[in-house]
Amino acid sequence: MNYSGGITFIMPNFAPMEKQTPTILVVNDDGITAPGIKVLLETMQQLGRVVVVAPDSPQSGMGHAITIGKPLRLDAVDLYEGVEMYKCSGTPVDCVKLAVNRIFKGSKPDLCVSGINHGLNNSINVLYSGTMSAAVEGAIEGIPSIGFSLDDYTQQANFEPCAKYVKAIATQVLEHGLPASTLLNVNFPKTADLNGIKICRQANGKWAEEFDERMDPHQRPYYWLTGEFQLNDQGEDTDVWALEHDYVSVVPVQFDMTAHHAISILNSWKF
């Protein structure tokens, strides 16, 4: 390129860089043999190299629990051809921690996906969910992360209608990344006729728990947790509303639990 000063700049002819295949960590809380993780890993195989680390048994409702009082086991398994898979004796969060520290040895995968869970993790359920806690741990590690859940608790649940949306959402996250300290909570209604995707906020709801008391053969009481979900939110921008209207709900979630709006109030107190 010639300029009036007489200096000639020669621009080097760089060859285009080859795009690297992304590495995707797949985790869940229903266990390594759950049907939901099969659909998830098969979908992720269309996008990159898949590594699976999942609990060796169901870990639903474990939240962000970690194992500190006993050793953890991590064993390679051969369940699906061409997939690097490991079963872990710990919690969903343990799976992510071991994957990052022992399998990836400190390097980070390009994406962490968790699920597809049997049962919704919308509204307040996100706090109890092992599925979402695994994704949260991925986000804490600085990995773009997504949790996927389906409104069907049965072993015959049909995860196939979720697959194209799982792929579309994961593709966008791989392309654009996510804001710092943020992950996605994605929930699917139980229908094959999905209306599309809604970006939502978490609905205000809670569980009204009861404990069903029963007696064992030695006449000692034991308890089964039961309860009913109570929705305290009629907004049409919530995950509950979206799911009730056959949309896929996508809620951006953050692990910074600071109640920023309360800081000024507390600063006005006389300590």
Image: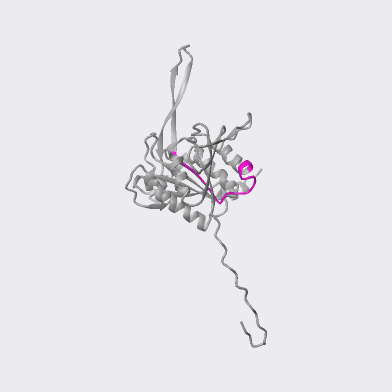
- At a point 53% along the width and 56% down the height, the residue shown is 177
Please give the range of residues in magenta.
Answer: 101-117
Q: Residue furthest left?
A: 193
Front residue of this view, candidates 233 and 50: 50
What is the total number of numbered labels drawn onto the structure image? 0
- At a point 47% along the width and 56% down the height, the residue shown is 172
Q: What quarter of the picture does the N terminus occupy?
A: bottom right
Q: Is residue 258 visible?
A: no
Q: Is residue 60 left or right of residue 99?
A: left
x%, y% of residue 7?
A: 67, 84
Front residue of this view, candidates 102 and 187: 102
Q: Is residue 170 visible?
A: yes
**Magenta stretch: includes residue 108:** yes
Front residue of this view, candidates 127 and 26: 26
x%, y% of residue 232?
A: 41, 42
- At a point 43% along the width and 18% down the height, the residue shown is 214
On screen, 181 above or below 227? below
**Magenta stretch: includes residue 57:** no
Q: Residue furthest top?
A: 218
Q: What quarter of the picture does the C terminus occupy?
A: top right
